[in-house]
Image: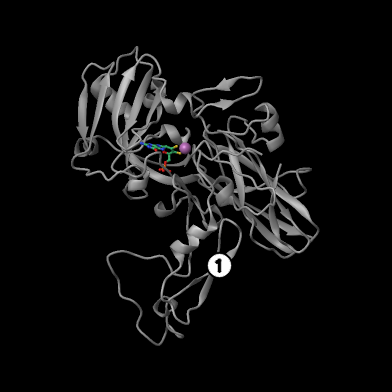
Amino acid sequence: MQQRDDQDKSITGGRISRRNLLAGAAAASVVLVQTASGKAFQAALTASERGPEDPTKVPGVPPGTLGTRSPFEKLAKIYSDTSSRTPLQDLQGMITPSDLHYERHHGGVPAIDPAKHELVIHGMVDKPMVFTLADLKRFPSVSRIAFLECSGNYRGANDGKIRPQEICGLTSQSEWTGVKLSTLFREVGVNPKASWFLAEGGDAAVMTRSVPVHKGWDDAIIAYGQNGEAIRPEQGYPIRLFLPGWEGNANVKWLRRIELSDAPFMTREETSKYTEAVGGGKIRQFSFTMDARSVITFPSYPARVEKGWIEIRGIAWSGRGKVARVEVSTDAGKTWQHAALQEPVLDKAIAAFRYLWNWDGNPTEIMSRTVDETGYVQPFLKQLMAARGGNMGYHFNPVTAWYLQKDGQVLFKAT
Ligand SMILES: Nc1nc2c(c(=O)[nH]1)N[C@H]1C(S)=C(S)[C@@H](COP(=O)(O)O)O[C@H]1N2
Ligand SMILES: [Mo]
């Protein structure tokens, strides 16, 4: 089975273990961390991380300049040279902690001095302009919670030993703050005949994408904030283009130039890449919208569960609008029930879902599918493969199932 993950190479479990192992820990307690290969390794804690036997008998640690994550929480992305993946199975709620946001870089993360960074807007405009970060922050600002997803976000595994992080960990969600692109369009006086704009990044890849101008008038944001602080370098510091619901690649990071035009620019990333076979020998280009998707994050591999009550938990999202409902099947897709959605359910945002289920202990498959407000139903893998003429590739959003063995071991299963 051909699988594409934005051309990234194999991600090995060994690297994450090296990164997380704390050196020099004597007589340490251990925390099990699951690697990509499914093997658990033991990450040692130092004595001070482990804390005293009785925390009521000694004063605790005083406040400091930054908070910390509990050393018992071994949250980690898995990564290759070009991307890293969010540990979806270890998260709660709808916001991805910023340091766990997935990453995808075509030329690494550039070091940019925000005081020197400028955004140029030119081309089919009345008045070409250069904006500093300070200029951008003077305009009215907006914040919105929305997901970001790489269009190369699918993996499967024939042996079933794969976690949500590997299946679709190239999706994350933040609260993004910035200035609406429409505000800047009015400032420079975009020519009514302009139909596309080029977005260019200031990284070593000088990533460029053409975006229809209507997205700029609609809901595009020049974002400088992420989850309450400045955007992280990995996410495009000091500014990125944020296009709610549209494929990650077009959300150009380290944004330095926007050029208005009456035609797409046909850059490398929209011609040789980021196009997909749609069957019948046809290739689809400029497929911006991310289709509806969901994944059950609990129970999921490598969990082992007991029979009885299980709260099935997961996340659902759609680039077309709001998630209308999530359906869960606990009998391999024969019957479907509605899951409860955590409010608020936002436009083009990840929604958490829950479904309480009493497992009788017999082997079965559980799965979820999203139906969004446009009526779009998340497809099965077989349907997608048939529609795409047997090709996997970009915009691959199949229903994924978890197989519960008799012994409670949970394994990934393709649909
Ligand atoms: N300048 C620039 N922008 C970029 C990229 C890049 O390599 N350079 N990668 C793109 C891709 S393929 C994706 S999926 C998203 C990833 O954004 P993130 O790293 O903040 O998750 O950024 C997009 N914008
Ligand atoms: Mo991507």
Q: Nearer the viewer, residue 343 or 399?
A: 399
In-image side of 80 versus 330 (left or right): left
Q: Specify the quadrant of the image occupied by residue 382.
A: top right
Density class for disc 1 (Cα within 10 Å; few <14, some 14-19, many ≥20) is: some
Judge whether 149 appears above or below 42 on screen.
above
Q: Quadrant of ligand 1?
A: top left
Quadrant location, the C terminus: top right
Q: Nearer the viewer, residue 184 or 236?
A: 236
Return the residue at label 1. 41
Quadrant location, the N terminus: top right
The residue located at (35%, 12%) in the rendering is: 193
Find numbered disc 1 in the image and state the secondary structure of the residue it sits on.
Answer: strand
The residue located at (54%, 45%) in the rendering is: 351
Q: Residue furthest top?
A: 193
Task: Give the colour scheme shown.
Answer: one colour
Number of marks present in the image shown = 1
Residue 380 visible within the image: no
Q: Amino acid at mark 1?
A: Phe
Residue 292 visible within the image: yes
Judge whether 188 appears above or below 370 on screen.
above
Instruction: Give x and y (percent) for residue 300.
Output: 64, 55
Instruction: Give x and y (percent) for residue 112.
Output: 25, 43
In-image side of 254 versus 285 (left or right): left
Judge whether 377 appears above or below 285 on screen.
below
The residue located at (64%, 56%) in the rendering is: 301
Q: Residue furthest bottom?
A: 57
Instruction: Give x and y (percent) for residue 373.
Output: 58, 33
